Image: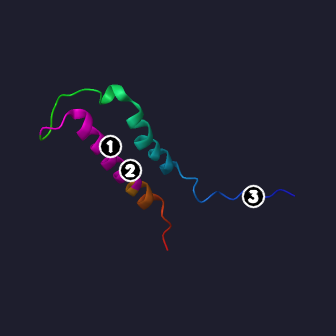
């Protein structure tokens, strides 16, 4: 008797986008420099802060795209 496999609730292609905020900070050549400065802060520091914004935005996009419509 063949049984159909249920698709997991978290098995969505949208979840692959969550790799962006994980992998981006793991690539130091992208942000390992001092210039350009923003409000006196070296690029290294404000880029790290921008990564937090990218992570929040990516998480919000994936949440909205994958939430169940009721």
Residues at discs 2 and 3 in contact (Cβ within 8 Å)? no
Q: Is residue 7 left or right of residue 50?
A: right
Would you name the residue on which mark 1 appears?
A: 51
Q: Nearer the viewer, mark 1 or mark 3?
A: 1
User: How far from the left and from the top, in percent, is residue 69?
Assistant: 48, 70
Would you name the residue on which mark 2 appears?
A: 58
Label 1 to label 2, Cα distance in Å? 10 Å
Label 1 to label 3, Cα distance in Å? 41 Å
Please give the name of the residue rendered at 39% of the width and 30% of the height, measured from the top-left corner: 27
Q: How was this image coloured?
A: rainbow
Q: Secondary structure at mark 1?
A: helix
Residues at discs 1 and 2 in contact (Cβ within 8 Å)? no
For the residue carrying disc 2, how many other residues have a C-alpha within 10 Å: few (<14), some (14-19), or many (20+)? some
Image vertical order of residue 43 relative to residue 7, above or below = above
Image vertical order of residue 27 relative to residue 55, above or below = above
- Is residue 42 inside the magenta stretch? yes
Q: Which residues are magenta?
A: 40-59
Would you name the residue on which mark 3 appears?
A: 4
Please give the name of the residue rendered at 80% of the width and 58% of the height, measured from the top-left corner: 3
Q: Which of the two residues, 7 or 57, is positioned nearer the viewer here?
A: 57
For the residue carrying disc 1, how many other residues have a C-alpha within 10 Å: few (<14), some (14-19), or many (20+)? some
Quarter of the picture containing the N terminus is: bottom right
Q: Which of the two residues, 55 or 33, is positioned nearer the viewer here?
A: 33
Q: Secondary structure at mark 2?
A: helix
User: How far from the left and from the top, in percent, is residue 66?
Assistant: 48, 59
């Amino acid at each position: 008797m063949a049984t159909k496999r249920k698709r997991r609730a978290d098995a969505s292609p949208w979840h692959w986008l969550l790799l962006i905020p994980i992998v981006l900070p793991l690539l130091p050549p992208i942000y390992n420099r001092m210039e350009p400065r923003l409000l006196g802060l070296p690029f290294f520091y404000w880029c790290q802060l921008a990564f937090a914004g990218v992570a929040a935005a990516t998480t919000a996009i994936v949440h909205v795209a994958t939430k169940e419509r009721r």
